[in-house]
Image (cartoon, grey):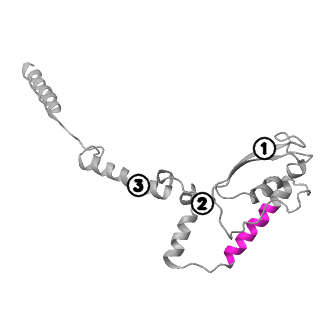
Amino acid sequence: MIDGWELAIKTMKGGERSIVQITDPRYGYGPTGIPPIIPSNAEIQIDVEVLNVEVGTDLGTVASEDPLKPRTPTSIAKAYATRRELKFLEEASSPNKEGLEAFISKLNSFYFFGFFEGETGQVAPWYLRPSITFPLAFFILGVAFYISYSQGAITERGLPVTDELDEIILLDSAASLLLTNFVV
């Protein structure tokens, strides 16, 4: 994040949309920029919409309180690592869940259960939630397999099956064999 964005977002209210224009490079990416994507001393324009505001939630800040302090990818990575460590320490010090609550918490931490759920609080539509669609897909496939098997579409491989055509062919070959033996 850049300091200008961080300062602008603090002044906005829920439901508000604005275009933040950062003309002072000290509040943007500074004299170094991010080559080759953002040139040095670049003016930045960001379209921001605040969907919802949670009162009393302090998420901290990645940007520094001092907008004159230069920000580099290394310092941003350090700030991110520090925040992750603090989050890990908070989780370690929180009381352990037991029973069904612990099981549900563990399931929600699995890759496919949390894949489409972000930290923004927005919920994906039901058809994009693997916790719903995966079991539903397995159920539908299981029913389709059961119906196919019970109706005879799936049989054990290798069993000799004869039908009317096989019987005609076998009778004709047996009759021709008898005729050839009889004529000789």
Q: Tell me the quarter of the image containing the N terminus.
A: bottom right
Q: Is residue 77 magenta?
A: no
Q: Is residue 41 left or right of residue 9?
A: right
- Between disc 2 and disc 3, whose residue precedes? 2
Query: Of the residues shown, which amino acid type is indicated by label 1?
Result: Gln
Instruction: Kindly report which numbered mark, 1 or 3, lies closer to the viewer in this rendering.
Output: 1
Q: Nearer the viewer, residue 180 or 173?
A: 173
Q: Is residue 46 left or right of residue 128?
A: right
- Between disc 1 and disc 3, whose residue precedes? 1
Q: Considering the numbered disc 2 on the image, is that residue within a helix, a strand or a loop? A: loop
Q: Residues within 10 Å of mark 1 (few under 14, many from 20)?
A: few
- For the point 71% across and 69% down, which residue is it? 87
Query: Of the residues shown, which amino acid type is indicated by label 2?
Result: Gly
Q: Quadrant of residue 182?
A: top left
Alpha carbon distance from label 2 to label 3: 24 Å
Query: Of the residues shown, which amino acid type is indicated by label 3?
Result: Leu
Where residue 136 is drawn, which disc sits there?
3
Q: Quadrant of residue 139?
A: bottom left
Q: Considering the numbered disc 3 on the image, is that residue within a helix, a strand or a loop? A: helix
- Between disc 1 and disc 2, whose residue precedes? 1
Pinpoint residue 114: horizontal percent, then vertical percent. 57, 59
Where residue 121 is drawn, which disc sits there?
2
Instruction: Kindly report which numbered mark, 2 or 3, lies closer to the viewer in this rendering.
Output: 2
Kindly identify which residue carries mark 1. 45
- For the point 68% across and 76% down, which residue is it? 92
Q: Residues within 10 Å of mark 2 (few under 14, many from 20)?
A: few
Q: Nearer the viewer, residue 127 or 18?
A: 18
The rendered magenta stretch, by its main secondary structure, is classed as helix
